[in-house]
Amino acid sequence: MSPTSARIREVGPRDGLQAEHEFVPTATKIALINALSRTGVSTVQATSFVHPRAVPQLADAGEVMAGIDRVPGVTYSVLVPNVRGAERALDAGADEWDLMLSASDSHSRSNANRNTWEALERLKPVIALGLENSVSLVGGLATALGCPFEGKVPYSRVHDVVGAYRDLGVRKLSIADTVGVADPALVRDTMSRLHADFPDCSFLLHLHNTRGMALANLLVGLDAGVTEFDASVGGLGGCPFAPGASGNVATEDVVHMLQLMGIDTGVDLEAMLELARHMVPEAVGHVADSSVARAGVSWDLHPAPEKQQLA
Amino acid sequence: MSPTSARIREVGPRDGLQAEHEFVPTATKIALINALSRTGVSTVQATSFVHPRAVPQLADAGEVMAGIDRVPGVTYSVLVPNVRGAERALDAGADEWDLMLSASDSHSRSNANRNTWEALERLKPVIALGLENSVSLVGGLATALGCPFEGKVPYSRVHDVVGAYRDLGVRKLSIADTVGVADPALVRDTMSRLHADFPDCSFLLHLHNTRGMALANLLVGLDAGVTEFDASVGGLGGCPFAPGASGNVATEDVVHMLQLMGIDTGVDLEAMLELARHMVPEAVGHVADSSVARAGVSWDLHPAPEKQQLA
């Protein structure tokens, strides 16, 4: 059975903008985060305290965090890759830290220059610092639902990485379909087993729509008890392995479907659509890749035509 | 539980091409139908015996049917709106007739110049002729899952139209989300109730991806016992109420997801993708609007990069 409500983590300002080649001015980022914070999303993933040389787009993380208005009730999350980043995130007063780890070794080596367990080792002091400071921690598992280099990642691997996070005190995990290859059977199986194997943990899904399956995957996630989902306004963020294809599932597409199904997200869909159609394209210089931004909502009716046609 | 196999009705040559403004040459249509017939789809909806003035694009229906190769095991379906069309379809030796009726009165008036029951009245001699000649009949219910003029269509209306078809001897029904407004909760509810209320009928789903929900809707359809789906190569066919938005769900997107889920369609995905990427764009003069045609299949692996990045 589907739940009656779900929480949306808006990841456009970090995961989305990170994929943009043209630098988005700091003031534009701040305006976007502020606007997103007022749409009713539970969390805004605002920026990343990664090394500026690794992601020049987010080199202004500190200024962004200092410049935004904090809307009460909204969690401001940042990506934290290492102790240096954690210290900056603490200074910036981020509510939640997104920790990143690839479930597959080859993706981990490609992204972090070390295998999964070596990367976890490096996160240990970050986790300790976060727990010490009562920061909410989200243990990310990139490629948990498929790796561009290895293909399917065995459930046992996902289980073990979740278990390792859990043993370190991280109880909230983000299960990611990083390159949009997961299908509903895999998502159903993975999320059911994770809930059964780790009853004291909560799981969120990070889905990409690269092959059109994001909403189907989200649906089976809901059925398997997931109630928190990452999504990106205007579908910001592409797929590095499929140029021109969709990346992150669009927030407005998620909210639209859930609203039709009677599942409350608290998000003002009209406000989100307004951002997807205007503010986002102006910020990044190209149109939003989302079905609902293009087609409009299901409940907008059309006047019946006067002119009658031959049948 | 999901079934282990599903059947694909390829509707690109009729429902897809009908939305194209530029006339597609008869030889091109024939080549496309022949190629589609060899991909493993169970049915090809080849053309429409509608009045040539109503749909000039398909004015060559007779020549198309006379020109194609019939692949053994493939059902060749045509749209039949009236007795004149039925006689032409009989002459052409079509295996299956698609009957069209709108579940909502305003859509019926807009498309067929009469309300649903008046339109059904007009189909009666067509149905009689089909049954007399042992043609397979598919009773279409356009707007069954939502109407662009009226919004949600009550289940009681869908039930009554199915019942009327059934009483006339039509046991196979096509439940259509004509303008891509249905959500998974509606599809689940509708298909479960139809199966319960009409155990001697079979139902296929005709889904549009206008708001990104087609594969989610297909998934709940499968769970509710539907095993036959319309789909259109390259996503051919737009949505008249949302210019630029997606229309029919793309065959390759459907086959790709089902294949990942271990549900056999018999369709050669590589062959279908080849058509979506090359033959279809050449035929209609624009690219295919399908996720898998753009992004490639989930199981295509990438070489792990040599260059290692800063983390």
Image (spheres, coloured by chain):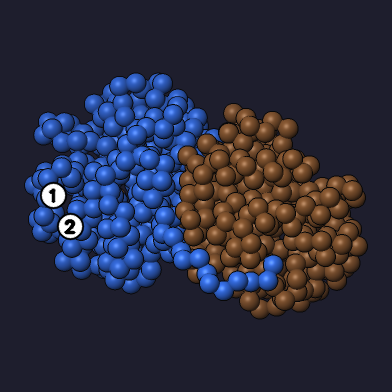
Chain colours: A blue, B brown
Vertical arrangement, residue A248 with respect to residue B13, above or below:
above
The secondary element bearing badge 1 is classed as loop
The secondary element bearing badge 2 is classed as helix
Q: Is residue A206 left or right of residue B47?
A: left
Tell me the chain of label 2: A
Task: Give the residue displayed 85% in from the left and 71% down from the top.
Answer: B63
Vertical arrangement, residue B9 with respect to residue B79, above or below:
above
- The spot of residue A170 in percent (x, y) is 26, 29
In this view of the protein, can residue A267 be seen by the observer? yes
Verify CB contact (< 8 Å) between mark 1 and mark 2: yes
Q: Amino acid at mark 1?
A: Val
- The spot of residue A176 in percent (x, y) is 40, 42
Task: Give the residue displayed 72% in from the left and 76% down from the top.
Answer: B53
Reading the image, the residue beneath label 2 is A34
Q: Amino acid at mark 2?
A: Asn
Task: Tell me which numbered mark, 1 or 2, is placed earlier along the sequence.
Answer: 2
Say how many tags the image has.
2
Quarter in which the N terminus of chain B is drawn: top right
Tell me the chain of label 1: A
Q: Nearer the viewer, residue A112 or A31?
A: A31
Task: Give the residue displayed 80% in from the left and 69% down from the top.
Answer: B61
Reading the image, the residue beneath label 1 is A71
Task: Give the residue displayed 81% in from the left and 64% down from the top.
Answer: B85
In this view of the protein, can residue B208 be seen by the observer? no
- Any mark on residue B6, and which? none
